[in-house]
Image: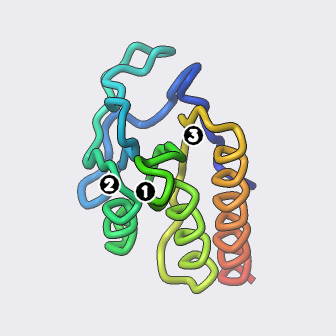
């Protein structure tokens, strides 16, 4: 039902060769995007490495993001968070405005990780429901 999420603190399992016109996004204000999948030792490619929620949301709005890896805390305490991005994705999924986005969580913030995961699972319920509606 839900896409398999990965825990980047342990492993990152992703398609290292994204299809043309589709985007893989790394969202983090401190950590560099990993270049190698530590499980398969394959090279990873990121189409966009962004440091703010606003940058990530702007990419999501294009409808081309197919994968996003989330950090929660993005700078100053008053700054928008990875959870804000996930809530935005959830709302857009509910409205049928964006295609499904697979995801991973690499944040060290346990509560934030849980919130992001819950929002993304909710988004997937909308995407799965729309797929079922279109297939009868």
Query: Which residue is located at x 26 percent, y 49 percent?
Result: 48
Which quadrant of the figure contains the C terminus? bottom right
Q: Which mark is residue 105?
A: 3
SS for callout 2: strand
Query: Which residue is located at x 51 percent, y 29 percent?
Result: 13
Tell me if 83 is positioned left or right of 16 in this view: right
The one nearer the camera, 11 or 28, is 28
Tell me if 58 is positioned left or right of 120 in this view: left
Query: Which residue is located at x 49 percent, y 82 percent?
Result: 97
- Compared with 100, 135 (above or below) is below
Tell me if 53 is positioned left or right of 99 in this view: left
Residue with the mark numbered 2:
23
Mark 2–mark 1 CB contact (< 8 Å)? yes
Circle 3 residues within 10 Å: few <14, some 14–19, many ≥20: many
- Compared with 118, 126 (above or below) is below
Q: CA distance from mark 3 to mark 2?
A: 17 Å
Mark in the foreground, 1 or 3: 3
- Compared with 107, 128 (above or below) is below
The one nearer the camera, 135 or 60, is 60
SS for callout 1: strand
Image spot of residue 60 (x, y percent): 39, 67
Mark 1–mark 3 CB contact (< 8 Å)? no
1 or 3: tag closer to the N-terminus: 1
Circle 2 residues within 10 Å: few <14, some 14–19, many ≥20: many
2 or 1: tag closer to the N-terminus: 2
Image spot of residue 1 (x, y percent): 75, 55
The residue lying furthest to the front in this view is 77
Query: Which residue is located at x 65 percent, y 47 percent?
Result: 112
Picture quadrant of residue 17: top left
Image spot of residue 63 (x, y percent): 37, 72
């Amino acid at each position: 039902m839900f896409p398999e999420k990965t825990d980047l603190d342990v492993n990152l399992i992703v398609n290292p060769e994204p299809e043309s016109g589709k985007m893989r996004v790394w969202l983090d204000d401190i950590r560099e995007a990993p270049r190698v999948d530590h499980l398969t030792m394959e090279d990873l490619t990121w189409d966009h490495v962004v440091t703010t929620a606003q940058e990530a949301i702007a990419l999501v709005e294009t409808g081309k993001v197919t994968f996003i890896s989330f950090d929660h805390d993005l700078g100053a305490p008053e700054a928008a968070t990875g959870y804000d991005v996930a809530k935005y994705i959830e709302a857009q999924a509910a409205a049928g405005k964006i295609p499904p986005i697979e995801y991973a969580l690499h944040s060290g913030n346990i509560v934030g990780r849980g919130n992001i995961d819950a929002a993304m699972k909710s988004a997937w319920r909308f995407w799965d429901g729309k797929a079922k509606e279109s297939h009868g």
